[in-house]
Image (tube, rainbow, N blue to C red):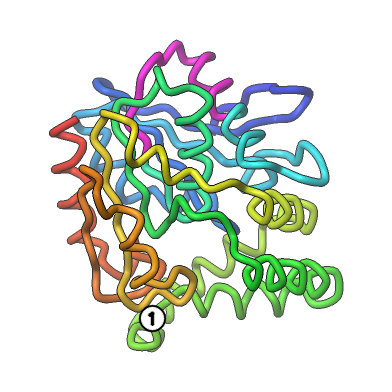
Amino acid sequence: MKQLLYKNTKIAYSDTGKGTAVVLLHGFLENSTMWAFYGNEFAQKNRVITIDLLGHGQTECLGYIHTMEDMADAVHAVLHELKIRKAIFVGHSMGGYVSLAFAELYPECIKGLVLLNSTTFADDHERKINRNRAIKMAHKEYTSLVQISIANLFSVDNRESLTIEMEQVKQEALKTPLQGYIAAQEGMKIRKNTEQLLHLTSYPKLLILGKKDGVLNYDNNIKQVEGTDVQLISFPDGHMSHIENKEALLTVLLDFIKKC
């Protein structure tokens, strides 16, 4: 991983391959390592940028609250450093929220947008309450909280067959410092609805959802693409499509990147 100093904060990123730039943004409690398989595949024909978002992976914390706009600005700083003017964005879960914030702040830089197990909807009241509970629990039982959180990301049907993969995700998640956990939770809690981006933008857009996602209700989230030109792909499993539907997702993403 390379490093960039942004607002006296170290931002870690990688830059491989040549061609149209593809920016891969990980989710909450994840880091750039989640993209290893996909990054290698994409880099055969594209320039692939992975970035550890604020308070995750090898990137330092910037403050007590990391808004999605804060994270988007850090991503923009990396792209500016690399002299990349336009890119295809693929964001998993929180990475999708950051991609949407980036699309609002820097619309001229978006060549295509993939929301992977993500949503344009803001947190509802119940979700905000749950985040507050998690923040309180994190101060007391951080390891247990992270372990439970990761298990819930996978569909019940896959938890036995993907025990090794789940353990790897847990180990990476536990590398996230407490401050990074809290700052991201606080930032996601106050993010705004960005549904208008799906209606008002002309670049290619793709929404990928899991029908058994325990984090994002499938039936509610398919509503955000009604009346839009957004392509919808539905997988039969949980929130971790990049693991639960690995080969199928690769095919879908390669096809989307090719069309952008």
Q: What secondary structure is found at the residue carrying circle 1?
A: loop
Q: Residue furthest right?
A: 140
What's the magenta region?
75-89
Disc 1 marks a residue whose amino acid type is Ser
Is 183 above or below relative to 61? Answer: below
Quadrant of residue 240 within the rendered picture = bottom left
Q: Which residue is drawn at 43% across and 81% down?
A: 163
Q: In which quarter of the image is residue 59?
A: top right
- Few, some or many C-alpha atoms within 10 Å of disc 1 (few <14, some 14-19, many ≥20)? many
Q: Is 59 a magenta residue?
A: no
Question: Up-down: is 33 above or below 50?
Answer: below
| Rendered location of residue 178, percent (x, y) | 78, 58
Taking 141 as reference, is 233 left or right?
left
Q: Which residue is painted at 46% across and 38% down in the image?
A: 99
Residue at left 27%, top 33%? 43
Residue 225 point in image, percent of width and height? 29, 53
Q: What residue do we see at 54% from left, 23% from top?
A: 76
x and y percentages locating residue 33 in the rendered image: 47, 50
Q: Mark 1 points at which residue?
A: 155
